[in-house]
Image: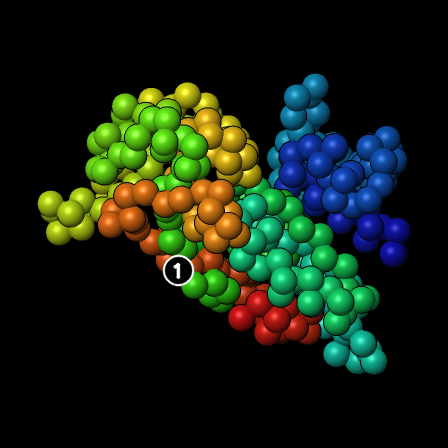
Amino acid sequence: MSENLNDLKAFVVIAQTGSFTKAAGQLGVSQSALSYTLKMLEQRLGVKLLNRTTRSVSPTQEGEQLLNDIEPLITGIEQKLYNLNEFRDYPRGRLRINGTELSLNFLLWEKLAKFSYEHPNIQLELTTDYTFSDIVKDRYDIGIRLGHHVDKDMIAVQVSDELQMITVASPDYLRTYGTPHIPEELHQHRCIGMRLPTHEQIMAWEFKNLEKNNEVVSLKPEFVMVVSHARLKVKAALDGLGITWLPKAMVESELINGELVTILEDRDISYSGYYMYYPARRESSLLFRLLIDALR
């Protein structure tokens, strides 16, 4: 029975991810072994569960029905196994967390490191991601995103203060090119932007409009460099390549030591803080309660 249950779980993960490669990675098995497992399951059941092409995997009609029937059951079994931690002398297990680079690397790292030190039998798997991943489909336990990006059907717990955005440049850059005094003057400067993977769009910069009751306005300067990783924006600014716009939390040490300076301070805006979110069914898990308490 345990083997059959594992086979069914393998089918669920493949169907949810739409990929043997992704499913194999999540389950910790080889792709060939997973393919064999699914083949044997289909033979035992006598029906084809998945349509396979070179680019995608999708459930057949029979597979879709099976997925709808067993996914809640398997999720429930996994939750019961999580809850067994209540009866152990010390908690153990794995928590997969998906968050942005800023939330995991800057805002929450010290708390996560302390949690890992205090609970050595809990494995933390941290994934930095700029897209808004479906944590249920991608089988993450917890997501961490800005508050206004959290799905309404998730339980959300705030884990950071407001996120202040600032505009910075190196002293060398400002000595060479001058200092802009209003956002519109950024069009005459060298600016470092970032492309977001969700919609393949370059992120717009947002500022207060002092002439219109601090209404938020968006601006896209002519970027001389566009990156896909926020730390590259910091490096470019430190090297005097241009002006960039980013969260203050990412460059606090560089501001203190004078490597970077702020400009347009009266136009700075703030976003709501980061939230940890997860499905309601996870709330009773000891592992979740421990992590929630650690990140508050």
- Compared with 52, 248 (above or below) is below
Q: According to the image, label 1 marks what residue? A: 162
| Residue 272 horizontal/vertical position (percent) | 37, 57
Give x and y (percent) for residue 113.
69, 62
- Residue type at mark 1: give it: Glu
Relative vertical location of residue 184 with respect to residue 216 in this rendering, above or below: above
Q: Position of residue 263 (x, y in %)?
A: 32, 43
At 50% from the left and 36% from the top, the residue drawn is 238
Q: Judge by depth and name the residue closer to the eye, 294 or 262.
A: 262
| Depth order, front residue of 167/113 | 167
Residue at x 11% of width, y 46% of height: 212
Quadrant of residue 150 in the image?
Answer: bottom left
Q: Relative to 57, is 29 above or below?
A: below
Left or right: 246 as drawn, with respect to 221: right
- Is 40 situated left or right of 71 in this image? right
**Residue at left 36%, top 42%?**
167
- Residue neighbourhood size for the residue with mark 1, other residues' Cα within 10 Å, grouped as few (<14), some (14–19), many (≥20): some
